[in-house]
Image (cartoon, rainbow, N blue to C red):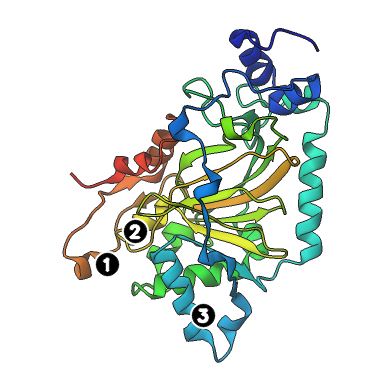
């Protein structure tokens, strides 16, 4: 399809409303980045100033069941308290399955636009599957250079069966604040009775001018823990407290785990949902597959009494997770501003 790439209305309708996506633009022959994808200078990622993070050294989850349990548990807790990101290996998911998942992601976005557009979030035949571009494109200053498919899991038992080692991570983090995984309060956050999870397939097409765009803007995840599969291209950056960016490098066979807002709130800020973002690249199309675990929408989220007693103050108020979700999805990404919704007055 040939059209005027400088006409922002036509461009927006083609990408967002018709569902052709950013990939559709590249496939149509667009060779330079135009509005509305050009990010304000402050939002661009200066990769020359970025460093490689300590997450380049993965944590061996299989050691949780051996004599190194205490050492490995300490590594998980320290990572959750500081960077908010870490990588794990020997996590129970085969490398073959991870590679198949990446191949499948490329195949999903290689489909004709009309097949993907059926699942546009405004008209999808299923409330459990949606397809789109960027986060809240109607409200963003510039659209993210990303197409995605989002799938919600509804069978808690099956989801947990596939992520046994993830449960061990949660167990370690909760035990460090004095809560057992089998505790009823733990089940209300991420247990066999009330967990829901959502998986995305993200597709970042090759970008002719990556210095002008971003794949995903500054944000922290709203759920409890995110488990992310990266491909070999890389591009995930985490913001440090001093404002510097560090890259979480892709490691073959590893999964990235990061803390979400719904773990920061119960831990009263002990565990950190770090601000992160994704850059684009001109060396090839990138895919990533995150799984977001979170409480049931009807669950109440509040700092755990054990942590409040230790800290002497509750830094967050009690709220329903569904209210937090509504606020999170109603606004464009803006760092950790979404967490302000839960802060105590």
- Tell me which residue sits at (43%, 33%) in the image: 42
Position of the N terminus, as image quadrant, is top right
From the viewer's perspective, tell me whether residue 252 is left or right of residue 180: right
- Which residue is denoted by mark 1 in the rendering? 307
- Tell me which residue sits at (63%, 34%) in the image: 210
Q: Is residue 186 above or below residue 131?
A: below
- Which residue is denoted by mark 2 in the rendering? 266
Lower sequence index among marks 3 and 1: 3
From the viewer's perspective, tell me whether residue 176 is left or right of residue 48: left
Residue 197 in view, yes or no: no
Q: Nearer the viewer, mark 3 or mark 1?
A: 3
Q: Secondary structure at mark 2?
A: loop
- Which residue is denoted by mark 3 in the rendering? 72
Position of the C terminus, as image quadrant, is top left
Give how far apart the Cα atoms at labels 2 and 1 are.
8 Å
**Residue that extends furthest to the bottom in the rendered view of this protein:** 67
Q: Secondary structure at mark 3?
A: helix
Q: 10 Å neighbourhood of mark 2: few (<14), some, or many (≥20)?
A: many
From the viewer's perspective, tell me whether residue 216 is left or right of residue 11: left
Q: Secondary structure at mark 1?
A: helix
In the rendered structure, are the residues bearing label 2 and label 1 in contact, judged by CB atoms less than 8 Å apart?
A: yes
Instruction: Pick whichever, 73 or 124, lies toward us.
Output: 73
In the rendered structure, are the residues bearing label 2 and label 3 in contact, judged by CB atoms less than 8 Å apart?
A: no
Residue 188's x, y, as percent? 42, 58
Lower sequence index among marks 2 and 3: 3
Give how far apart the Cα atoms at labels 2 and 3 are.
22 Å
Q: Is residue 270 above or below residue 28?
A: below
Instruction: Pick whichever, 252 or 54, lies toward us.
Output: 54
Residue 123, quarter of the rendered image: top right
Residue 329's x, y, as percent? 46, 33
Residue 176 in view, yes or no: yes
């Amino acid at each position: 399809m040939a059209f005027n790439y400088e006409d922002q209305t036509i461009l927006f309708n083609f990408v967002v409303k018709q569902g052709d996506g950013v990939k559709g633009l590249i496939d149509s022959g667009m060779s330079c980045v135009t509005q509305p994808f050009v990010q304000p200078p402050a939002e661009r990622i200066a990769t020359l100033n970025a460093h490689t993070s300590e997450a380049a050294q993965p944590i061996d989850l299989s050691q949780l069941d051996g004599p190194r349990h205490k050492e490995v548990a300490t590594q998980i807790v320290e990572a959750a308290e500081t960077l908010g990101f870490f990588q794990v290996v020997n996590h129970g998911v085969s490398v073959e399955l991870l590679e198949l998942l990446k191949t499948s992601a490329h195949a999903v976005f290689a489909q004709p636009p009309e097949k993907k557009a059926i699942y546009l979030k405004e008209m999808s035949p299923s409330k459990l599957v949606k397809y789109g571009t960027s986060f809240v494109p109607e409200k963003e200053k510039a659209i993210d250079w990303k197409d995605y498919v989002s799938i919600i899991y509804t069978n808690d038992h099956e989801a947990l069966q596939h992520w046994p080692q993830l449960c061990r991570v949660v167990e370690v983090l909760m035990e460090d604040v004095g809560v057992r995984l089998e505790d009823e309060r733990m089940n209300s956050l991420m247990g066999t009775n009330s967990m829901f999870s959502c998986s995305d397939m993200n597709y970042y097409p090759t970008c002719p001018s990556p210095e002008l765009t971003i794949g995903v803007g500054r944000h922290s995840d709203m759920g409890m823990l995110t488990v992310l599969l990266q491909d070999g291209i890389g591009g995930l950056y985490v913001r440090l407290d001093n404002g510097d960016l560090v890259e979480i490098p892709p490691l073959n066979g590893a999964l990235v785990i990061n803390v979400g807002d719904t773990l920061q709130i119960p831990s009263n800020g002990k565990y950190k949902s770090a601000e992160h973002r994704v850059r684009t690249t001109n060396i090839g199309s990138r895919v990533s597959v995150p799984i977001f675990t979170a409480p049931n929408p009807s669950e109440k989220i509040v700092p755990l009494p054990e942590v409040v007693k230790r800290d002497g103050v509750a830094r967050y108020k009690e709220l329903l997770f569904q209210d937090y979700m509504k606020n999170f999805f109603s606004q464009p990404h803006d760092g950790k501003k979404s967490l302000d919704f839960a802060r105590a007055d």
